[in-house]
Amino acid sequence: MKNHPMPMNLAKWIHHFGVANRRNRIEPAWNAPLAMADEKRKALAATLAEYQLGDGGGPCKLIARDAERLRASDDEVKEVIDLWFKEEAEHSRLLGGAVRRLQGEFVTDTFAFRLFKLCRRALGAQYEMLVLLLVEIISTAYYHVICRHCDDSPIAHMCLLILRDEGGHVTFHRERLSSLYPTGVSRAWKAQFWALGVACAVFLWLGHGKWLRTIGAQRTEFFDLVTRGLNRFINRLRLAAERQPSTQADGHERDWRAGYAAHSTVAIPTR
Ligand SMILES: [Fe+2]
Ligand SMILES: [Fe+2]
């Protein structure tokens, strides 16, 4: 497992993406009657059309310079990455259904999308996966907001399907990072995580806030969901590190404690 790019239980995730999460997926009733004020319909169509491009609509694969090297490193790594992106492509397809339902116009390029690709390419594939993880946490807040305020069953249904997938993606990344940092992440890593996460959320609100406000969402509502998502991720990463099987150092300490206990009647304080 040493130097393996994903030293985790990949078979479990291949089964999740390839089999378990494909069950019970009912297509939203796109042709159901639409009763929505014109202003709201246009705002919803505009925000979802831009999201359709970013959420699986652009290059639906890892695009960092060393992405192919990562995929080629191991058959299971390749399979799990491809299955994860297959779900992202499904999000784009679902969002396309929503844009058509709302008679919106598809978007093929935006400044935000070009910047997003630039960030993903900036450093290696591990960094790109961190950027994508943050986008998944921020997207979870976005889809919750859309689901709450869209007042349309097929679009709410679509949000729930995507949220179900994104929940799996975030957990996949949590397990991936736990396997790379079994004793926990550093303060610098956490600072980078928060800085990038907040920057990503601010950027999303700058671009989509006007449309989200039109459908009835509040800025505080969105940022509250983002903060909770980022916090939850860091807390679960910490809990996973605390639950990790004993590390080498712990093993040494256990041996030392056992040896000490055999020769002394003085209790050793426990942590
Ligand atoms: Fe997605
Ligand atoms: Fe995702």
Image (tube, rainbow, N blue to C red):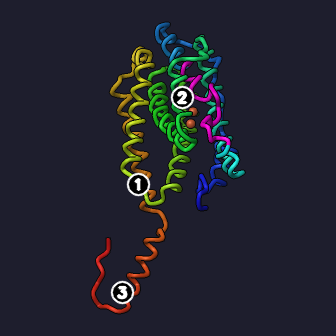
Q: Nearer the viewer, residue 178 or 4?
A: 4
Say whether residue 19 is visible.
no
Quarter occupied by residue 62: top right
Measured in 3D between alpha carbons, the distance from the residue under mark 1 to the one under mark 2, in whole angstroms, is: 30 Å
Residues under labels 2 and 3: Cα distance? 56 Å
**Which quadrant is home to the N terminus?**
bottom right
Identify which amino acid the numbered label 3 is placed on. Tyr
Q: Secondary structure at mark 3?
A: helix
Q: Is residue 88 magenta?
A: no
Q: Residue at x 39, y 26 (%)?
A: 202
Which residue is found at the position 59% from the left and 22% from the top? Answer: 53
Q: Secondary structure at mark 1?
A: helix
Relative to the observer, which residue lies in front, 164 or 174?
A: 174
Which numbered disc covers residue 238? 1
Quarter of the image with the C terminus is bottom left
In the orientation shown, which residue stands out farthest toward the top?
Answer: 38
The location of residue 265, given as percent across then percent down, is: 29, 91
Sequence-first tag of 3 and 1 = 1
| Magenta segment, prevailing SS (helix, strand or loop) | loop
In space, the residues marked 3 and 1 are separated at their CA atoms by 30 Å
- The image shows residue 238, relative to residue 43, as above or below, that is below
- Describe residue 93's horizontal placement relative to residue 215 as left or right: right
- The residue at which mark 2 appears reads as 118
Q: Are marks 1 and 2 in contact (CB under 8 Å)?
A: no
Residue at mark 3: 260
